[in-house]
Amino acid sequence: MAQTETIQTDRLVLRVPTEADADEITLRIGVKAVAWHLGRAPFPYARSDADSFIANAIENWANDKAYVFVAEYADEGVIGCVGLDLHGDDIWEIGYWIGQPWWGKGFVSEAASAVMDWGKAKGMSKFVSGHFVDNPASGRVLEKLGFVSVGIVDHIGAARGGPSPAQRYALGASPQDALRTASH
């Protein structure tokens, strides 16, 4: 798929990340409360982590393995990110994060819904996701998107330094797929 994809929502522009986004991504994920809820983000989160994230996102777009969109909000720049990662057998994991100043304002639901619609328009039909159990707001986002809770597994969080219970969800995919592909 083209690396120039852009999605416009009511409040956001969702687009492929570029190297110019590294400072804003570092600033937003560099807050412990944000990194704590992510599977792969370490804490502290350094500029080099953002550089690697962006390089991987661009490479994965080119190889059709994952589609990451940064979320830009008006004059505030990049405030978050939503992505779809391929997990074999056409199963797509949706993951997302938003900077702490924008929590509780519907931005994640807006962005995730738009990316899900984009994926469905591209022929994607099996989705999985999850969140650490101490982040119920993420579960509410998934339920709004139509996901169904299928169980709890331990998941390693880089910022947490070890495993924590994570609630898993499926939409069009089997519960076993959601439990087997536990990552976000």
Image (tube, rainbow, N blue to C red):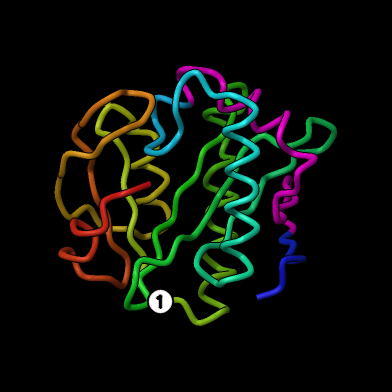
Q: Which residue is located at x 56 percent, y 62 percent?
A: 60
Q: Which residue is located at x 42 percent, y 66 percent?
A: 86
Which residue was labeled with disc 1? 125
Q: Which residues are magenta?
A: 8-34
Front position in the image: 106 or 159: 159
Quadrant location, the N terminus = bottom right
Residue 84 spot, x, y in % from top left? 49, 60
- What secondary structure is found at the residue carrying circle 1? loop
Residue 129 spot, x, y in % from top left? 34, 53
Residue 13 as seen in the image, left or right of residue 157: right
Does residue 113 lie above or below 36 as drawn?
below
Residue type beneath disc 1:
Ser
Check residue 72 for magenta coloring: no
Check residue 23 for magenta coloring: yes
Count residues near mark 1 (Cα–Cα under 10 Å), then give few for <14, some for 14-19, many for 20+: some
Residue 94 spot, x, y in % from top left? 44, 56
The quadrant in which residue 40 appears is: top left
Residue 130 spot, x, y in % from top left? 31, 47
Front position in the image: 91 or 72: 91
Front position in the image: 130 or 145: 130
Q: Which residue is located at x 39 percent, y 34 percent?
A: 137
The quadrant in which residue 169 appears is: bottom left
